[in-house]
Amino acid sequence: MESSQDPRELDIVHSWHVNAGAWSNAIRTSSIASRTLVTNQAIIDAVSSVAPRRLLDLGCGEGWLVRALSTRGMSVVGVDIVPELIARAVALGGGEFQVQDYASIANRRARLGAFDAVVCNFSLLGEQSVESLIAALPFYLNHPGYLIVQTLHPVSACGEYPYRDGWREGSWLGFGRDFSNPAPWYFRTVESWSAMLERCAFDILECREPRADAAASPASQIWIGRARRSAQTSGPRSME
Ligand SMILES: C[S@@+](CC[C@H](N)C(=O)[O-])C[C@H]1O[C@@H](n2cnc3c(N)ncnc32)[C@H](O)[C@@H]1O
């Protein structure tokens, strides 16, 4: 972590250290309804649509998506900053896991090899940390290389606030009493997400808005982007 970092970026990481156990339990017991109803299958479908052979799951948590996609024939590496979550993922198996923070991926220090796609499932929570991370991803991608991001839907998640980019207070409302220390998160409008992906050299191929059949509003937003440049086309270098 860089010392000049916004303290709110550090709060995000601290919160995940504190809540690792509660989060693992919530995933193990399938207690987040929107996930079991809509967003788990939606991200599996979105990643499957680009058919990667080797996939990187950034902010993989306890690794459920790595396991789900490995059983579909993909070779998946999951990384997360929280050692407790990675220990849980390793114990459950079904993929390769490493403790890594976004900063070391952003500054290209992470030794991960090359991938056909990168997926971020509800794991892009900060401001500058996220843009630096996404800007570095073409370095880790083969050609063609894809990025699949699932986030809260900006229109649904905006609440009573003005529909403008900015830091928002966190909340674990509805997550149960085991959770504490909610972290702030950085809200981006739909326009801002799409502009950031374009700035970071990803062409947007698709924007999906998955929702439950009976629901009035989408459960999430999924971006599928293709890198305009990639490790294999931007000059000779060793990826290992
Ligand atoms: C909402 S959880 C999602 C976990 C997983 N992708 C899933 O779908 O269950 C967000 C994850 O992002 C990880 N994360 C947040 N900031 C990170 C950072 N700077 N570097 C690496 N992982 C980070 C957290 O540790 C946490 O596991």
Image (tube, grey):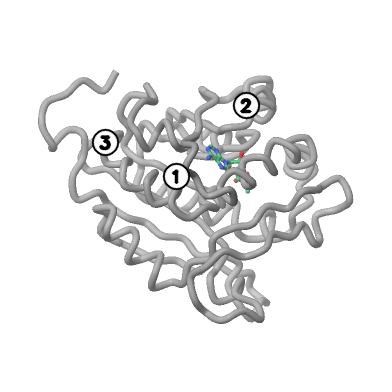
| Residue located 43% across and 28% down the image | 75
Front of the two marks 3 and 1: 3
Query: For mark 2, does the 10 Å Cα neighbourhood hold few (<14), some (14 to 19), or many (20 or more) residues?
Result: many
Residue type highlighted by circle 3: Phe
State if disc 1 and disc 2 touch (CB < 8 Å): no
The correct choice, above or below, for 11 with respect to 98 in the image is below
Question: Foreground: 184 or 50?
Answer: 184
How many angstroms separate mark 3 from mark 2 (CA)?
A: 24 Å
Question: Foreground: 104 or 29?
Answer: 104
How many angstroms separate mark 2 from mark 1 (CA)?
A: 17 Å
Q: What element carries label 1?
A: strand
Q: Is mark 2 on a helix, strand or loop?
A: helix
Question: Foreground: 200 or 26?
Answer: 200
How many angstroms separate mark 3 from mark 1 (CA)?
A: 15 Å
Residue topped by disc 3: 139
Residue topped by disc 2: 86
Query: For mark 3, does the 10 Å Cα neighbourhood hold few (<14), some (14 to 19), or many (20 or more) residues?
Result: many
| Residue located 21% across and 20% down the image | 238
Residue topped by disc 1: 119
Q: Most extreme residue toward the right, as rendered?
A: 177
Disc nearer the start of the sequence (2/1): 2
Residue type highlighted by circle 2: Ile
Task: Provide residue 133's location: percent of width, then percent of height.
Answer: 39, 44
